Image (cartoon, helix red, strand yellow):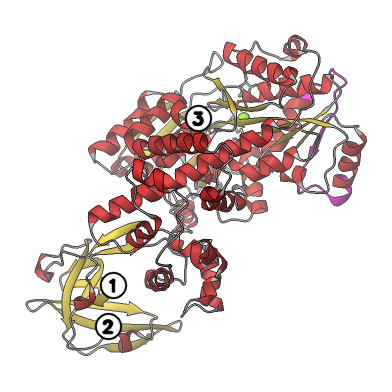
Amino acid sequence: MSSLFEIPIRALKGVGDKKAQLFHKLGIDSVGTLLYYFPRSYEDWSNPLSIADVEGGQVCCVKGKLSATMRESRLPGNRYMVRAEVSDGFDAMRIVFFNNKYITQMLKYDTEYLFYGKATKDFSGVQMVSPEFVLAKESADTFHPVYGLTAGLTNKAVQNAVKQAISMLPLKVADPLPDFILEKYDLCGLRDAIINIHIPDSPVSLQRAQRRLMVEELLVLSLGIRSLKQQHKEARGTNITADFTEEFLSLLPFTPTSAQRRAMEDCTRDMLSGKVPMNRLVQGDVGSGKTAIAACACYNMVKNGKQAAFMAPTEILAEQHFATLQKLFADTDIRVGLLTGSATTSNKKKIREALAQGEIDIIVGTHALITDKTVFKSLGLAVTDEQHRFGVAQRSKLLTKGDDPHLLVMSATPIPRTLALIIYGDLDISVVDEIPPGRQPIDTLLIGTDKRHRAFNFIRKELDNGYRAYIVCPLVEEDDSDLTAAEEYGAELMLEEFSDYAVGIIHGKMKYQDKEKTMRRFASGELQLLVATTVIEVGVDVPSATIMMIENAERFGLSQLHQLRGRVGRGDSKSYCILVSDNTSENTQKRLSVMTSTSDGFKIADEDLRLRGPGDFFGERQHGLPKLSIADFSDMSTLYTSQDIATDILEDSPDLSGDKYKGLRASIRRLFKDSQGTMN
Ligand code: ADP
Ligand code: MG
């Protein structure tokens, strides 16, 4: 199996340079990675409908033959169209293909096909645009895999490539899971699993394949994370010798909550201990006051004669932290610096020199901090804020800047304890489960689109009163056609509902600098309304933003909604969050009503886990983990199984040495190799 990771995807028939580029976009470069590129879902082609039964808007399968001559026509803008008609023996439907010159050669007359696609229906009958199709007599496999795609690459192209790759599998595939584990946990072998996940021969074998591969992936993840912890344990750490926490507290303009106090003490204790460097995660809801905890750790380090670095995922956030720390330490001799990518070259050079000379005690910055050019005189502590935006690899890069510095990572994404132990297996955890007193709760409402106009009125009223607002629309990343969703929707709002207001648009595919610029204009008040995809998750503080409307709220995980909602209610004014959803399924309504009934992020995370399973909590976007391909579908039982297996394996071989674990070691290396996180 592992040799297939050495064979470039180019080696497959029908994959030339251009296609290889497209596969590369999906993270697929070798035949091996292609085999591990699992379908997102499956279409059931086993029950074709008769055309008379097809409903408008239905995604379905129809069996039939061409019943009229195909007609080709040119459209303006160099576009090209083929129209045909399909009959099931009783009724006919139209099918249309755009810009596919080969259709007329691919589709044969007098031949029965299965057509699969979304049907529309109007007075002139049923129509399918660009349906998928296969020869009816060939469709022994009734589950058709659906892959995540990128523009220019069709599902069929991926399917064909996968079929070839499968034919290259050796008869005896070396399995990273040893036999005794497969037997004990009743898991199928790797070869079976890979074949059945791509071309399932029955629902049961699909399930077995999924279970085996999920368990394997979660196992590889947690063994990898545990080995990171092991590495960290071998370091020495630059210890502090005295505790300056009380002195720090006298600088704070407020009394810390007891949760903040506890977290501060956890950090000091770690840094005083002298055995291993601190490796701690501070997990606390938006607004729980994590900055003060980080500042306390920095203060302790600096007072003990070493430097501290404070890394934030965006420039604005870095600037905000810089301003906070400067103010906090204004009456002390602590020198705070700022290093971001957009500073002038000469300015950056000056700051870096000062850092190397030890003339800056605390440096706040973005990923500019981890480039090779940045050198510290003596870095004793590295802090990363909103850690889910950084990959595990970036975290470790910061650590190479000093002599085994202590590490403090902060996250505003609460996750349930059971999962934290796995996802953050390499970190100790402090939970900040208390919000400073005097905060006004955010009023959260759930409405259907029929009330949207009333919501717009309300938003306009807030804007007229000098406040600012966010409107968030979800983005389906796999589908390029939706990439412009925020842009289009924003343009519509600009022209119609909010034509008298200053509206800005921000989305994930914008260049980093453009995003920053737009965010800045919003923070400064130049823009009143920001139409956004989820990129606003990261903690920028705009105190006068008092209202957020979230479209298609059902598409977000609860924890994500909670994160988003945390963007408002950061000032003294009453704030609101309006969730818009027309989805009336009981489960969705139940899920969304959790948002209206509590503002406790940990409670919300627990509910999320209960209602949607653990999948949402994995993946790089939430926690800086390597990108997983299948754990998304997991449930708690696969998670527990993977943990049991990890224990069995580590008992058998604590350092995974020996031939038996060669495959597992290779899998761990592969998973963590590309873990660069998701900055920006
Ligand atoms: P987080 O990073 O956890 O989202 P911040 O550190 O940005 O939260 O704190 C949010 C706001 O609350 C800041 O304005 C901060 O000054 C204030 N704050 C933090 N702790 C307290 C406290 N114990 N009492 C009052 N205000 C606080
Ligand atoms: Mg923060």
Quick one: 455 or 260, which is closer to the camera? Answer: 260
Along the polypeptide, which appears first: circle 3 or circle 1? 1
Q: Is mark 2 within 8 Å of ligand 2?
A: no
What is the secondary structure assignment of the residue under circle 3?
A: helix
Q: Give the residue pinned by disc 2.
A: 83
- Under mark 3, the amino acid is Leu
Residue 1, image x, y percentages = 48, 62
Task: Give the magenta range.
Answer: 327-347
Residue 287, image x, y percentages = 56, 25
Q: Is residue 139 visible?
A: yes
**Dot in front, 3 or 2:** 3
Report the side of 308 relative to 645 (left or right).
right
Along the polypeptide, which appears first: circle 1 or circle 2? 2
What is the secondary structure assignment of the residue under circle 1?
A: loop
**Residue 669 within the magenta-colored segment of the rendering:** no
**Dot in front, 3 or 1:** 3
Q: Give the residue pinned by disc 3.
A: 421
**Residue 343 within the magenta-colored segment of the rendering:** yes
Q: Give the residue pinned by disc 1.
A: 131
Report the side of 270 relative to 227 (left or right).
right
In the figure, residue 617 lies in which quadrant?
top left
What is the secondary structure assignment of the residue under circle 2?
A: strand
Residue found 50% across the figure and 67% down from its top: 31
Residue 530, image x, y percentages = 53, 44
Quick one: 589 or 272, which is closer to the camera? Answer: 272
- Disc on res. 325: none
In the figure, residue 655 lies in which quadrant?
top right
